[in-house]
Amino acid sequence: MQRRTLLQAGLAATATLALPPLARPALAAPAASRVLRFIPQADLAVLDPVWTTAYVTRNHALMVFDTLFGIDAQYQPQLQMLESATTEDSDRTWRLVLRPGLKFHDGTPVLARDCVASIGRWGKRDAFGQALLSATNELAAADDRTIVFRLKRPFPLLPAALGKAASSIAAIMPERLAATDPFKQVTDMVGSGPYRFKADERVPGARVVYERFADYVPRADGVAEWIAGPKRALFDRVEWTVIPDAATAAAAMQNGEADWWEQPTFDLLPLLKGDRHLVLEQLDPTGTPAMMRMNQLFPPFDNPAIRRALFGAVDQAEFMTAVAGTDPAYWRANVGFFPPGSPMASPVGMEVFAGPRDFEKVKKDILAAGYKGERVVLMIATDFPVLQAMGNVGADVLKRCGFNLDVQATDWGTVVQRRAKKDPPDKGGWSVFFTAWSGLDQFNPAGHVGLRGNGLNAWFGWPNAPRLEALREDWFAASTPVLQKKICEEMQRQAFIDVPYIPIGEYLQPTVRRDSLSGVLKGVPLFWNVHRS
Amino acid sequence: MLGYIVRRVLVTIPVMGVVALFVFSLLYLAPGDPAAIIAGDQASPEQIALIRASLGLDQPFLVRFGGWAWRIAHGDLGTSIFTNLPVAHMIAQRIEPTLSLMLLTLVVSLLIAVPLGVLAAARQGTAVDRAVMLFAVLGFSTPVFVIGYLLAYVFALRLDWFPVQGYMPLAGGFWPFLRALILPAATLGGIYIALIARITRASMLEVLSQDYIRTARAKGLGQRGVLFVHALKNAAVPIVTVVGLGVALLIGGAVVTESVFAIPGLGRLTVDAILRRDYPVIQGVVLLFSFAYVVINLLVDLLYTLFDPRIRY
């Protein structure tokens, strides 16, 4: 190529970059401004919030369905679909009265019997619901607007259970849908929430559309906080576009093709921060506490002394730096069994994480506890960057502790299948894996399945910790927040003895939105109150 | 000819049967449990077992395969484990973007690659030939996602000519449809253009050395006539073969391209289904792709007779 030709090509390229954009297809501005374009954390594969605990389904359910109570920013349950909630008979009877004028999306009125059926179905699947129903003698509709709980014993946490924002919310649906077996999916999305699901516009794996439910009546009182207070839908339509590739989602935000991206990846945060039209903020103050979960059916982790010895090797900051980077604005160390800042969190037993990590001492402690060189199978899900980062740090920690480590890198689909196996690690079972959930699922003993100690019926890893189970029962019966907190302190003390899992810190997942959006509520992604300014 | 077509179509049936058995067996043996994925991270083992039973996933291999094969034989691809929607409906929703992307890529690639290959052959050993071959090597060796990100950065983010992501159906207007597909088609086309240009050049070089080409030139036929009327037609058989074989390349490339540009096509449907272990969807899509591939091979065989009258079936 001649020098002149090269220069001409360079000039042409520069001129091309300076050209104005091609005309876009015309979209009437007022119509566009009434549409909220959202990129969810994952595809909405399952619609039924009772059938799955997936967060994306919970977020969808909060748009379509309403709940009897709703927690506020202080994690206190407030009346939502209810006009009143009263107790009688030494708190053994609850009378819940529905607000007048509530309607389902098919135009039928919301009746007490719909709520009874919905609670019954939800209570067969959700841990908090199961606890509530096990304390219930009778759940009935006294009339069209009154739901009556007759309890075997007082259950002061009834409003908290029915108003939870963690996964598997107590969604109210018509009786005909709520009569479905809780182990079968409901796909007819008829709720009474502020947005109506547009089944005809759904493209699974790509697009979900909601439109404002014109007959929804927001509460007249209260403050819009989390899922409490008036739910005013201010957009005509909310369109979820599933963008699996993080770089593409970031580009869509920068280009103005999307208004709100629920979970930007940590590696892209510097890029997004640099865009003056984008706002990064953390919605969920409970964060995402992560854990190292061990299989307690087989050596070496059937030995509590070995599990306890591992505390000396865990540097939570190291784990979280691998997950979320060096900016401590996006993670917290010194995390116990309840998320820092949440009502049940306490410093009890946290000294195990203090001071420098001493791997030689941990090695000696593990050998002294009886470790005989058994193979430790660590499963790492490589298709989720966060889980992969935890797994990689965990592998290094376990190696340095002297374990005979067998790292098995695979996808999450394989991990969730294999972790259900109760076979020994050398016969297709496992020893360790890492995971993380929203702090909302861990902020009290009700839904905190990682803290259960009910042996073979417990969550994967199957810890047998009778004292933890007894304390959990006490917590349900505790009548005041002070008592509840005291019990949780005791639970944390016991957890550091039984070690159902090892907390490895928590990361603070930010969300990113265009600066033209205002009124985004804290908590989980919520689509009421938010508007375009 | 008609007899040949009928024979080929009939042969398709056992081929699809073998594909079906192979795909089903592979998925049965592969690790993963859709029930565990459906139930979510915090579900108990007992809940997962109940979901598995409700979906019939606890049935023995032969019962599951028999039921599935019976439904397939009746034209029913089954129902997605996750969405509860018929697989045929999900494929129908996704087929337009993928077909549009592949057709546009195919047409644009042929329009670019064949003249490039002819040009390179006609100017063998010159800078033009080397430039075309350099482009072909680059096109072949650069991963599709790298091309995709580069094009999106320049033409979508910097110049704002095209959208970063998404798909606009043809029903929404031709320009919006085309505008959304230009970058993905350019991304996917790179490797395809490289492949066809190389084959066209090689095939043309062989034909251009034949005696009848020398005769045509001696008779005073112009360069264009020699290249495009006499040589290209005779060089077409290997080109058509590679175009047909390259459809598999397009299918693989579409999976990546659809992910990069968030196009709701069959490629993404396949990836999502594999990650979730949504067996009926994976089986349905793989069967469809296999069927399409068999049909394309049949078409390629039939096209041979068009370009070379000596070939008869």
Image (cartoon, coloured by chain):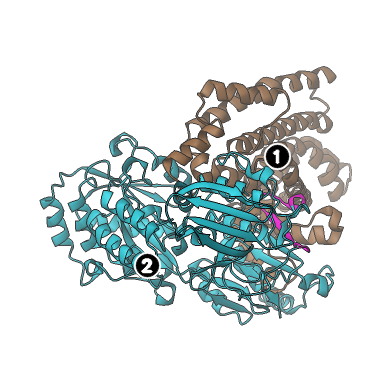
Chain colours: A cyan, B brown
Q: Is disc 1 placed on a helix, strand or loop?
A: helix
The answer, for residue B32, to whether it is visible in the render is no
- Image x and y of residue A139, in percent: 55, 48
Single out the mark in the foreground, 1 or 2: 2
Residue indicated by mark 2: A344
Magenta run includes residue A27: no
- Badges 1 and 2, same chain: no
Q: Residues within 10 Å of mark 1 (few under 14, many from 20)?
A: some
User: Is residue A98 left or right of A405 when viewed as pictured?
Assistant: right
User: Is residue B267 left or right of A354 when viewed as pictured?
Assistant: right
User: Of all residues shown, which one is farthest toward the bottom?
Assistant: A276
- Image x and y of residue A205, in percent: 65, 51
- Image x and y of residue A408, in percent: 36, 46
Q: Quadrant of residue A23?
A: bottom right
Depth check: A92 or B131 in front? Answer: A92
Q: Which chain carries label 2?
A: A
Q: How crowded is mark 2: few (under 14 residues within 10 Å), some or many (20 or more)?
A: many
Q: What stretch is highlighted in magenta?
A: A199-215
Residue indicated by mark 1: B206
User: Is residue B156 left or right of A183 when viewed as pictured?
Assistant: right
Residue at 31%, 63% (x, y): give it.
A487
Depth check: A366 or A318 in front? Answer: A366
